[in-house]
Amino acid sequence: MKQFLNFIGGEFIATGKTFENRAPVDNHVIGLVHEAGQKEVDAAVTAAQVALKGDWGRMSVVKRAELLHAVADEINRRFDDFLQAEMADTGKPHSLASHIDIPRGAANFKVFADIVKNAPTESFQMTTPDGGTAISYGLRTPLGVVAVVCPWNLPLLLMTWKVGPALACGNAVIVKPSEETPATATLLGEVMKAVGVPDGVYNVVHGFGPNSAGEFLTRHRGVNGITFTGETRTGEAIMAAAAKGVRPVSFELGGKNAGIVFADADFDKAVTGITRSTFENCGQVCLGTERVYVQRPIFDKFVAALKAKAEALKIGPPMEPGVSLGPLISAEHKQKVMGYYAKAKAEGATVVTGGSEPRMSGALAEGHWVQPTIWTGLPESAGVIREEIFGPCCHIAPFDNEEEAIALANATDYGLATTVWTQDLATAHRMAAAIEVGLCWVNSWFLRDLRTAFGGAKASGIGREGGVHSLEFYAELRNVMIKL
Ligand code: NAD
């Protein structure tokens, strides 16, 4: 039986207290995960502190950047190992994992190494009251030991998106992967060791949230900052833990994102775009669209076209040719999504397509499959329009004018992302300014330039990462004032 071990101070550590890691496609046991307790979390914090005082702490940014390039190269050399591990843990299609998860996961190390290596700091010269001169400049120092608490939907990508800049800035990290997806974080330990990243710089502790590795780590006073991606509710718990010691947090949280399609949009591109933003990764993308608003003249045509696209999605396991829709991550998550499917019906939705489970054969019958689902006809107060579902589903409602579309999009506590489809440049700019989100895509979705800011407004997050914005969290900016 495969064992997923903790990685602490450069060693793989068994704890003997294990839980099962199951495959979403057929619920078979992939392996046993060794849960870290307080003792292992303490050891990881100590290992990280020791690393900061050792070679790593003295290493130049140029040398760190070289090592991080080597990490990326080693991930790419072992591309297939990472791909197989990610597909086994998540069940996501090969086409998705091989184009997004693994290559972008590797790229995070190179891009942030180069950004941090080349980032300037400010400098000012001033005249002092005695008529002399002083020069001040900014100096960036690492935050210290950074806890990286990760979700299961894009395990390697969302973890390295934080580990990359954290290490480039000279921190040591302790990663707590999701209990659902322990594999690629563990594999990355092998990569770190192989390329010579000093022991204790990259650590992994496995386990759950409350009363387990997640809570032990975020409560630990030896942790100097916490970067977290996951549910808003979990963010609240972590923020309370971080309050002790006034430790900084960077949060990427949940969403209930609106997609807005104007009548003047390129129709086919808009349909294809909303198909992706609603159904990609089986709807388990924080940036995904669960509320679609379509301008009335094209409403019926759009609903029919999206229905046809949803029904054309091929459901199946990662390696089956042509598959574009995998399973949900777990039995528990399936129960939650199916609960919303039932709730939509109870609330009076018109089920345009889907609404139940697909029939799967053989061993796949034990997997966590759900049908891609579209609803219409619900009032905006309905639960499935208000709450994040995180499944392959959306509600589509008509709107008449721009003001109405803005009001609908903003009528939520969340503020992560939106996707707007129009050919009118002025409309696009007005919408981008008016919708309360961290990310606004126009005639596109999930298109990312790692040099740009990423994060959520309102209940969807705290802070921004990406490009030089990552430096604002992963480094302390010190001002040095020199009187000449
Ligand atoms: P989750 O909040 O349930 O878990 C995330 C991580 O937090 C896991 O590693 C979990 O073990 C840990 N955790 C749970 N409770 C904890 C606690 N009390 N203390 C410390 N750690 C704790 O989220 P999930 O179900 O893994 O992921 C799905 C959610 O993530 C969705 O809400 C989605 O919108 C969000 N998400 C947001 C972004 C973004 O960029 N904004 C990206 C991906 C996912």
Image: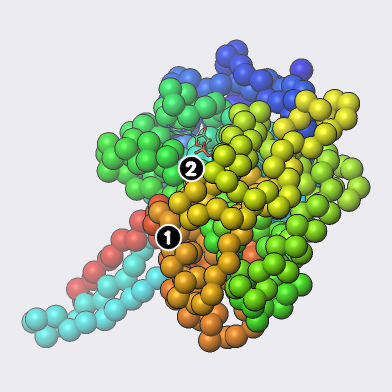
Query: x%, y% of residue 415?
Result: 45, 59
Residue 453, above or below 132: above
Residue 61: which disc? none
Residue 439, above or below 76: below
The residue closer to the viewer here, 223 or 373, is 373
Residue carrying label 2: 231
Query: Furthest residue to the front?
Result: 348
From the viewer's perspective, tell me whether residue 293 is left or right of residue 217.
right
Residue carrying label 1: 411
Q: CA distance from mark 1 to mark 2?
A: 19 Å
The kind of residue on which mark 2 rests is Glu
From the viewer's perspective, tell me whether residue 23 is left or right of residue 49.
right
Does residue 318 appear in this view? Answer: yes
Residue at 82% in and 44% down: 315
Q: Nearer the viewer, mark 1 or mark 2?
A: 1
Q: Quadrant of residue 180?
A: top right
